[in-house]
Image: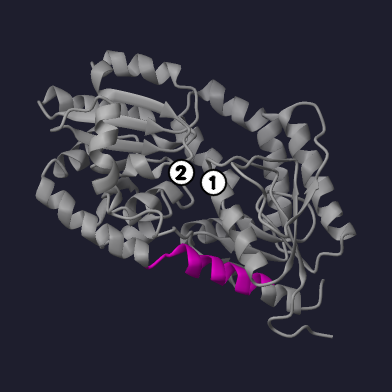
């Protein structure tokens, strides 16, 4: 018997762990709240869930046992245990935001691991390429990914960009009708151009940024993949030319090697590393330009937040958000994310305040077309549709 649209159902959500800093985690939080708002019985399966406050009211939390041992073993055991727990509780449909075994609806928010490894290998010395191929963690992730993305794997796949959809088809041969593209969304009430009036002067004073400096903001964890070294080198080039620039980095990662690079390029007094932050909006409020030359990026939430704040974005064509930015005049897309010269040329364009103002207005327009509420509603509609179908 098929369920009627709007009937409350038991829905499971799988995410191995949550911290309040990551983009994928914010998607999970928003999804849970959207499902609960429609009256569904929502079960969350995770090993760890860290929040600034209580879990959403009505959410049923199940702690999946954390097996001690190396990283690849923890990944594999969670991939096995979490879907079994969801099945025991009789969830009508299950959405997984991590690579797991079984046949859930899978949101490929982290992109295609095989594609990322290939992109990374092209910029590594031979011995590191060998390590990538032999790493137990990478081999485990590729095994799980193949099980999910190949025909007969996940019940349905949700890609957060057309780029990810095309990679799934290219690497794993999944039929296009079994993949839905739903771009990430942004809270346009939390992230808005008015933040500049609230935070610009205060944060510049706190970070010891001169009034005339061009503030380049970098937000993200995984500094190698997101191109922090290229940002530092390009900013250093502009500074040598006499442009007053200041780089602000928000995120989690091993910073020591990058601080050495900062000293090498004479950026000691114009570089601020503030670590992971819950309230990132204050940093968008003090930024002139958002910079993220990622080597591989499914669809950057941080770029979308910057656009919503009216901050022009300079990123790479390898970022899934390029498909909503292209031709919109809201920033610039670099072809080669490892080219210091190309990035420096792009940054130099936005040394002109008038250009930044114009691009900022268009950035806000792009973000308004991807509101958090609308994108979450599309994902919830999809889950409700799968719950109305007979389980495979």
**Magenta stretch contains residue 17:** no
Q: Is residue 69 above or below residue 285?
A: above
Residue 121 percent coordinates (x, y): 50, 33
Residue wearing tag 2: 296
Q: Is residue 217 above or below residue 240?
A: below
Q: Residues within 10 Å of mark 2 (few under 14, many from 20)?
A: many
Location of residue 233 in the rendering, given as x and y in whole percent from the top left corner? 27, 26
- Any part of residue 336 in sight: no
Residue 115: numbered disc: 1
Of circles 2 and 1, which is in front? Answer: 2
Q: In the picture shown, does residue 36 fall above or below 47?
A: below
Query: How many badges with numbers are in the image?
Result: 2
Mark number displayed over residue 270: none
Say if 209 sits above or below 41 in the image.
above
Q: Residue at x 74, y 74 (%)?
A: 387
Q: Which residues are magenta?
A: 369-383
């Amino acid at each position: 018997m098929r369920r009627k649209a709007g009937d409350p159902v038991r829905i499971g959500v799988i995410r191995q762990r949550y911290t309040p800093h990551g983009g994928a985690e914010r998607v999970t939080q928003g999804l849970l709240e959207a499902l609960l708002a429609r009256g569904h019985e929502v079960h969350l399966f995770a090993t760890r869930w860290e929040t600034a406050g209580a879990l959403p009211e009505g959410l049923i939390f199940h702690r999946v046992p954390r097996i001690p041992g190396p990283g690849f073993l923890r990944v594999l055991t969670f991939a096995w245990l979490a879907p079994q727990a969801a099945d025991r509780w009789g969830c009508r449909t299950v959405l997984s935001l991590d690579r797991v075994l079984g046949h859930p609806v899978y949101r490929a928010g982290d992109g295609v691991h095989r594609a990322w490894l290939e992109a990374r290998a092209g910029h590594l010395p031979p011995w590191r390429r060998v390590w990538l191929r032999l790493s137990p963690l990478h081999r485990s992730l590729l095994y799980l990914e193949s099980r999910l993305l190949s025909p007969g794997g996940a019940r349905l796949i949700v890609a957060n960009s057309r780029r990810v959809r095309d990679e799934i088809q290219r690497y794993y041969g999944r039929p296009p009708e079994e993949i839905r593209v739903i771009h990430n969304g942004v809270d346009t009430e939390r992230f808005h151009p008015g933040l500049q009036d609230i935070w610009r002067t205060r944060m510049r004073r706190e970070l010891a940024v001169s009034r005339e400096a061009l503030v380049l903001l970098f937000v993200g964890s995984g500094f190698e993949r997101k191109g922090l070294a290229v940002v530092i080198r390009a900013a250093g080039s502009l500074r040598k030319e006499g442009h007053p620039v200041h780089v602000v980095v928000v995120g989690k990662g091993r910073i020591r090697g990058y601080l050495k690079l900062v000293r090498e390029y004479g950026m000691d007094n114009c570089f601020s590393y503030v670590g992971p932050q819950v309230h990132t909006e204050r940093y968008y409020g003090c930024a002139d330009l958002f910079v993220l030359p990622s080597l591989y990026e499914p669809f950057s939430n941080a770029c979308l937040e910057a656009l919503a704040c009216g901050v022009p974005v300079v990123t790479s064509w390898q970022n899934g958000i390029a498909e909503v930015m292209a031709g919109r005049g809201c920033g610039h897309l670099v072809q080669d994310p490892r080219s210091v010269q190309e990035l420096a040329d792009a940054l130099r364009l936005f040394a002109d305040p008038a250009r930044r103002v114009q691009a900022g207005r268009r950035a806000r327009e792009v973000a308004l077309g991807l509101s958090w509420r609308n994108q979450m509603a599309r994902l919830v509609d999809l889950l409700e549709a799968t719950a109305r179908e007979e389980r495979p």
